[in-house]
Image (spheres, rainbow, N blue to C red):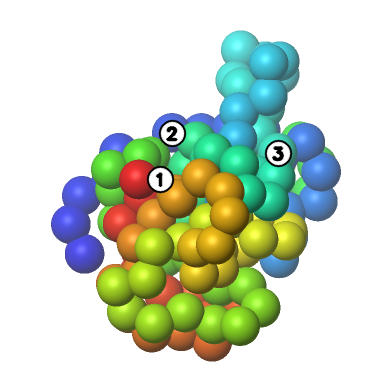
Amino acid sequence: MGTTHEFTLIADADFSDKLGCAVVVKAELVHKTPVGKLATAQKAIDGIVTDITANGKAGAPLAVARIGDIAFAKIGVGGVTVGDELVVGTEGRLITAGEGVKVAKALATGAENELIPVLIK
């Protein structure tokens, strides 16, 4: 699926089921590594979680795909269709754009909680 330019964040909470969810970087560091939290609905993002270690508990490292990358994202309520512009819904999952900052484009059709490839914007 091409090269991603991942970076590492430290989870600020339990991320055990958050693979493919949108995140933002908090203004704090843990052992010189930035801390990440789930993105808020309708807001901008810093990336999408692509790998979770240590069972995803708070303090665990998270690999995050950057803006401009293609990554697998978790879809929220209502599903999406290939080509849809996407925004952040609840729990960092992506939904078809309505109000809010467009953060990705769907590269496949997907149902709620499914992981599909998206272009991160």
Report crowding for label 3: few under 14, some 14 to 19, many 20 or more residues within 10 A (C-alpha).
Answer: some
Count of numbered circles in the view: 3
Q: Which residue lies furthest to the front in this view?
A: 99
Label 1–label 3 contact, CB within 8 A: no
Rendered image: mark on residue 65: 1
**Quadrant in the picture for the N terminus:** bottom left
Q: Residue 37 carries which label?
A: 3
Question: Which is nearer the N-term, disc 1 or disc 2?
Answer: 2
Tell me: 100 left or right of 68. right
Identify the amino acid type marked 3: Lys
On screen, 101 above or below 111? above
User: Which circle's residue, 3 or 2, is located before the other in the chain?
Assistant: 2
Q: Is residue 74 left or right of residue 106?
A: right
**Residue kind at label 1, given as amino acid type:** Ala
Q: Foreground: 104 or 61?
A: 104
* Numbered disc in front, either 3 or 2: 3
Q: Quadrant of residue 108?
A: bottom left
According to the picture, the residue beneath numbered tag 2 turns out to be 7
Q: Does any portion of residue 74 appear in the rendered image?
A: no
- x and y percentages locating residue 58 in the rendered image: 80, 42
- Vertical comparison of 5 with 99: above or below: above
Quarter holding residue 117: bottom left
Residue in view at x 70 percent, y 38 percent: 37
In the rendered image, the quadrant that contains the C terminus is top left
Q: Residue drawn 68% across and 24% down?
A: 26
Q: Dot 2, how many residues are within 10 Å of its Cα: few (below 14), some (14-19), or many (20+)?
A: some
